[in-house]
Image: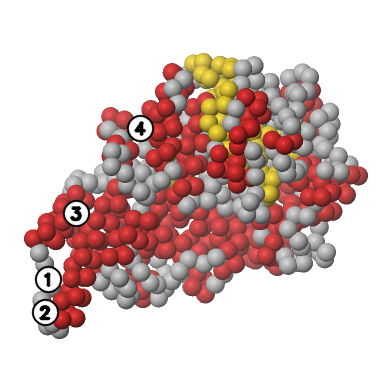
Amino acid sequence: MVPIPTPAPSVSSFASVTTATPLEAVAHGAASPSAPASLMPGLQHLYASQLPELCVASRPARAPRPALQVFNHALALELGWPTEALDGPLGAELFSGNAVPDSAQTVAQGYAGHQFGGYSPQLGDGRALLLGEVRDAAGQLRDVAFKGSGRTPFSRGGDGKAALGPMLREYLVSEAMHALGVPTTRSLAVATTGERIRRDSGAVPAAVLTRVAASHIRVGTFQWVAAQGDEAMLRRLADFTLARHFPELTPQTAPVRAEAAASSQAAPSAHATQLTPSTQSIQAAQLVQPAQPTPAATYLALLAAVCQRQAALVAQWMGVGFVHGVMNTDNMTLSGETIDYGPCAFMEACDADTVFSSIDHGGRYAWGNQPGIARWNLTRLAETLLPLLHPDVDEAVALAGGVIHQFSAAYQCQWLAVMRAKLGLVGGTKAVDDAGAEGADVARVAASEEVGGVAGGPGSADDEADLALIQGWLTALQGQGADWTLAHRYLCDVAEAVSSTVTAAMAATATHADAPLPTTPARASAASFAHQRLANLFADPAGLAAWLPRWQARLLRNPSGHPPDWANAMRRANPIYIPRNQLVEEALSAASDDGNLAPFHVLLAVVQHPFDEVPGHERYAQPGQPEHVQGYRTFCGT
């Protein structure tokens, strides 16, 4: 691991974007009328006030005929915002960008990033604006941002707009991921603007998505700051991130504590042509400085904690068959949330090489490559932190390399926990928390990878046996056309048949110690149906037939408990409903082409309860037709 050799822009060249694209022009004329602050109570602007060098003030474009299409009542309640007032004309004005509260300081955030492996020294929010932060009902700070709200200084010639279809996709899939229990940004609203914008498919309705996130601090944010060679700025960004996301690593630093003072700090100027800190912004930045200089070990712990969160996140992606599609470093958050749902989709037929993105020609971000790409991205993050880890570069590289080397072990631990839950395997090593990334159970595992990113190593005998069983399941699935989601869900029924037999055996044994394993015609019929339904998913079920007895024997070695609970626990880990690609496309086409959001709302309601099978919803559980699945491609939406 060595520092990124690519030349980076200076602060002045970064600022030249605003010179080439004046913010007065970006704002599209006169300032928009403001919305009442009561619509977004508690809105703050900590990032804009404390890290002003990393963002530029910008205003949303005017929407000629705004209309609110989707509104997330439950999420608004989490934020403590008035749902009745927002779900109507006032909400349409607000969520289209026409009227934002005076308490908002809309800024476009700057960052760099590796895109498909190539370094881009200057990216930034080309069609997004951060409105500010709000503390939710659980006491957590959440970013609130627009996507598709018009040109910014980072638009690079684009129109800064978003089409309705991609914004509805992000709303649908992000809410589905939340229901699946996967850490993710959330979607608060989608509003159409009344415009039609030109895309490859022709003229389509324009829309603005309102996103809620733990934060928008990315690996690419650190890449841009590190490339400037400004160690003081890098330290401030790292301290801000620690206070925002990992306060437990710095006990002497309270969580971001500028809330009371932030409103008194000057906002980034919409007329500035230099991204240099003013006296006021320097004072604001000092609000996130710890009482004592942060020790190097804390920055190393930050890297380890981010690695652990990403290991857990990607393991969960893999478990539900999610293919992100654009795992660039600017799309990896330090909070550990899934972000950017542009070309994403869910794998149906299990294949490690599954790719959906139309621009991923080489399969870099295929389903089976995601754990390795996560490690690659985290290595880029580690490179940015080198100046904070040790004054000697070689020593810093060794320290960072030690943490990165443990990522494969951390990922394997998380993957093992995910798959044990899916296969009903009780016992063994548990996944570790953020602070446990360097724990003994993780560090002892080697870093080799197989299908699905599973590492093999000298773990406990139970871990090794379960890893071999999991790998056997993946091998049985690979290339057989078996639907990933249904294969796991149908396996729950097979587990139920096994547990039913075990329960009957336990009852018989309690009465007669030498009683044979009991069976009945009804029990045998149910077991036969469950096995056959699962086998029908496979082009050649021979591999499945060879694997099932091994798995059933392992189920019988589960620790003492109630066997009927095995299948129920598996069903809580294996959804019956996911956003099926064909159904997503049908819903988005109906909304974009015909103005009909009914299919979208029905699909949304189904995927918000992914584990609860409902009679009459069979269509939403089935994979797409072969003619749709073959060659299915997704697009970024820009």
The residue under label 3 is which amino acid type?
Answer: Ala
Q: Which residue is mark 2?
A: 515
Q: Nearer the viewer, mark 3 or mark 1?
A: 1
Q: CA distance from mark 3 to mark 1?
A: 18 Å
Near mark 3 (Cα within 10 A), the count class, few <14, some 14-19 or many ≥20, is some
Splitting the image into 4 quarters, where does residue 454 fall? bottom left
- Which callout, 1 or 4, points at the residue further toward the start of the chain? 1
Q: Nearer the viewer, mark 1 or mark 4?
A: 1
Label 2: state its secondary structure.
loop
Q: Is residue 564 left or right of residue 366?
A: left
- Which callout, 3 or 1, points at the residue further toward the start of the chain? 1
Q: CA distance from mark 2 to mark 1?
A: 8 Å
For residue 582, the mark is: 4
Task: Please state the horizontal and vertical placement of residue 229, each as a whole percent of the image.
Answer: 77, 49
Asked whether the beta carbons under mark 4 and mark 3 sit within 8 Å of each other, the answer is no
Asked whether the beta carbons under mark 2 and mark 1 sit within 8 Å of each other, the answer is yes
The residue under label 4 is which amino acid type?
Answer: Gln
Q: CA distance from mark 2 to mark 4?
A: 51 Å
Task: Please state the horizontal and vertical placement of residue 530, each as a whole percent of the image.
Answer: 19, 54
Near mark 1 (Cα within 10 A), the count class, few <14, some 14-19 or many ≥20, is some
The chosen color scheme is secondary structure
The residue under label 1 is which amino acid type?
Answer: Pro
Label 1: state its secondary structure.
loop
For residue 518, the mark is: 1
Q: Is residue 364 visible?
A: no
Residue drawn at the location 12% of the way across and 56% of the way down: 525
For residue 530, the mark is: 3
| Quarter containing the N terminus | bottom right
